[in-house]
Image (cartoon, grey):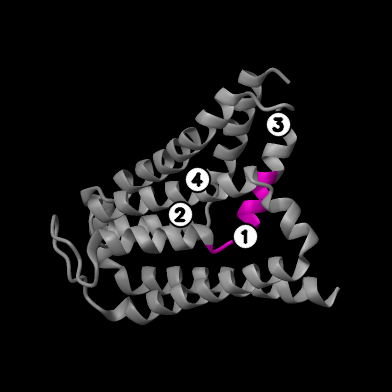
Amino acid sequence: MDPPLALLSILGTLAIGTMSPGPSFVVVVRASAGFSRRDGLAAALGMGCGGVVFAGLALAGLQALLMQVEWLYLVLKVAGGLYLLYLGYRIWRGAKTPLAATEGAPPAGGGWRKSFVIAFVTQLSNPKTAIWYASVFAAFLPNPIPTWMLWTMLPLIFALEAGWYTIVALAFSATRPRAIYIGAKLWIDRVTGGVVGLLGGRLILEALRGRAT
């Protein structure tokens, strides 16, 4: 495949996966509507950095390692699932807590730095994402890979991940979505915490079933 066409195919396929709703989307929406636009943008940057880590690992051959060392993949799955369960619990437990932040003020407990870290760790909590990146690369990367592609791949993937979640952050930090969130915070947080927790539990169950088989 022609290298420029291969690059467009990779970015297009990854964009579909990035825009699919999941824990990352939930975290960015909650940071944006629940705290501030700055928190949402920090979360978007965290997602972009997480995407770069996965892309770099995929290029380095993580897929082959995980397929050969089965227990390592199971450990990563369980660890990611436990983190999502913990995150879901924290969101659920804080559902009744009023927002400490007002418009334009940072929330208590870490501010935008905490939002960045939570988003970054959430992005890395699912090792299946690494397999997804590696599979897309295996399907479309030319052999040999041109040097210019190696230099441009990671910045473009960062722009893709961070760009999409920046759009999400800007949309959900607007006045009306924020007002809706504040008015229904209790139930929104409980649903959010439940969804994130269920995704974590599903990841753990997949790991245990994989070990059983």
Which corner quadrant holds the N terminus?
top right
Q: Which residues are magenta?
A: 125-134
Residue 31 percent location from the top left of the image: 32, 59
Q: State the predominant SS element of the stretch in magenta.
A: helix
Residue 79 percent location from the top left of the image: 58, 73
Please, what is the three-letter code of the amino acid marked with disc 4?
A: Val
Q: Which residue is mark 1?
A: 127
Please, what is the three-letter code of the amino acid marked with disc 1?
A: Pro
Q: Residues within 10 Å of mark 2 (few under 14, many from 20)?
A: many
- Sequence order check, earlier mark of 2 and 4: 2
Please, what is the three-letter code of the amino acid marked with disc 2?
A: Phe
Q: Is residue 25 left or right of residue 114?
A: right
Q: Could you tell me which residue is drawn at 71 percent across and 72 percent down?
A: 207
Please, what is the three-letter code of the amino acid marked with disc 3?
A: Phe
Q: Is residue 109 left or right of residue 2?
A: left
Instruction: Give me the disc on residue 140.
Output: 3
Q: Could you tell me which residue is drawn at 45 percent across and 40 percent down?
A: 158
- Can you say whether 38 is above or below 9 in the image? below
